[in-house]
Structures are given as C-alpha cells and as structure tokens.
Amino acid sequence: MSPAKRNTTLVDAYASLLDNLNSADKLDLISKLAASAEIDSQKKKSAFRESFGAFISEKSAEEIIAEIRDSRVSTRQIEPL
C-alpha cells in the first residue's frame, strides 16, 4: 500500500470518528491541529539551518587554529635501525 493511500485511509478513519463531535469541539480541534502543524514547520526550518554546522565563537580563526595545533599530542616513537 502506498504512503499516500495509507495516509488517506488514516485521515478518513479519523474523520469518521470526529463526525460525532459538536461544532465547538471541532473548531477547537482544528485550532489545535493548526498550531501543531505550525510548530512542526518551525522545527523543520530550524533543523534545516542547524544542519550546516555553523560554529559560533568569540575567538578569531587564527586563535582557534593555534589552539588546535597546540593541543596536538604525538606519541610516535621512532626505533633506530
């Protein structure tokens, strides 16, 4: 079964369950669903922006590079021939 067909079936099942609600409850449900959809949209936008791996620091690039180089440790041992 395709995802579109499955989602349509699921939506139709929920719609048949909600037929018994009064108008006020249906409007309340609509507003809650709209708010939920808006929050999901905002989360997707922020996740998209965060996926680029931006690094925020007060240090300059040269300071960061020097710090990384200074923190390197070499444990390499050269054996004489």
Image (cartoon, grey):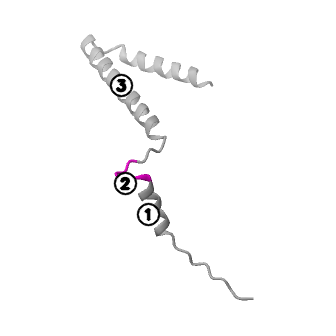
Quadrant assignment, res 28 = top left
Q: Residue furthest left?
A: 24
- Left or right for 27, reference 11: left
Q: Nearer the viewer, residue 9 or 76?
A: 76
Q: Position of residue 66 (x, y in %)?
A: 45, 62
Q: Which residues are magenta?
A: 56-61
Look at the magenta stretch and give its main secondary structure: loop
Horizontal and vertical percent position of residue 50: 44, 40
The crowding category of the residue bearing disc 3, from other C-alpha atoms within 10 Å (few below 14, some 14 to 19, many at least 20), is: few
Residue under pointer 3: 38
Q: Is residue 18 magenta?
A: no
Measure how far apart labels 1 and 3 are at the Cα level. Answer: 42 Å
Res 47 label: none
* N-term-proximal mark, 2 vs 1: 2
Residue at which label 1 appears: 67
Of residues 9 and 38, the one drawn nearer to the viewer in this rendering: 38
